[in-house]
């Protein structure tokens, strides 16, 4: 799945990602950045992610602006 970071707190690791296909929001799982190139995330950053057993975003990787258009978040 691909989406956009809606919010991220680097201190706590809490955040939300909005999925491109239907604009559903998912919380970022604990340890979602482990093993990735990300040290932190920024609002509006495009990511590819998977969902864990608790329906939280995990396995974050860089997303592509070419594959999907940026959703209108207004």
Image (spheres, grey):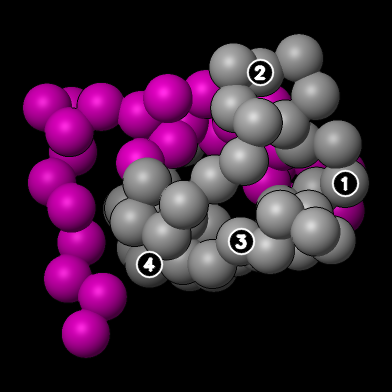
Kindly check if marks 3 and 2 are in contact, taking CB atoms under 8 A apart as contact.
no
**Quadrant of the rendered structure where residue 44 is?**
bottom left
Please tell me whether residue 26 is drawn above or below residue 62 in the rendered image.
below
Element type where label 3 sits in the image:
strand
Q: Which residue lies furthest to the front in this view?
A: 11
Q: CA separation, marks 3 and 2?
A: 16 Å
Q: Mark 4 points at which residue?
A: 23
Q: CA separation, marks 4 and 2?
A: 24 Å
Q: Residue at x 67, y 46 (%)?
A: 57
User: Mark 1 or 3 closer to N-term?
Assistant: 3
| Side of 34 where 2 appears, left or right | left
Q: Which mark is residue 30?
A: 1
Kindly check if marks 4 and 2 are in contact, taking CB atoms under 8 A apart as contact.
no
Labels 3, 4: front one: 3
Q: CA separation, marks 1 and 2?
A: 13 Å
Q: Does residue 18 show up?
A: no
Q: Name the residue under label 3.
A: 8
Kindly check if marks 1 and 2 are in contact, taking CB atoms under 8 A apart as contact.
no
User: Mark 4 or 2 closer to N-term?
Assistant: 4
| Side of 73 where 56 appears, left or right | right
Q: Which residue is drawn at 17% across and 71% down?
A: 72
Q: CA separation, marks 1 and 4?
A: 22 Å
Q: Residue 36 carries which label?
A: 2
Q: Residue 64 carries which label?
A: none
User: Mark 3 or 4 closer to N-term?
Assistant: 3
Labels 1, 4: front one: 1
Mark 4 burial class by Cα count in 10 Å: few <14, some 14-19, many 20+: some
Element type where label 1 sits in the image:
loop
Element type where label 2 sits in the image:
loop
> What residue span does the magenta drawing correspond to?
46-74
């Amino acid at each position: 799945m691909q989406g956009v970071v809606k919010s991220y707190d680097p201190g706590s690791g809490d955040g939300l990602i909005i999925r491109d296909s239907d604009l559903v929001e998912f919380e970022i799982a604990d340890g979602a950045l482990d093993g990735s190139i990300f040290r932190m995330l920024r609002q509006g950053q495009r990511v590819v992610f998977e969902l864990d057993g608790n329906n939280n975003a995990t396995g974050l990787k860089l997303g592509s602006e070419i594959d999907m258009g940026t959703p209108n978040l207004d």
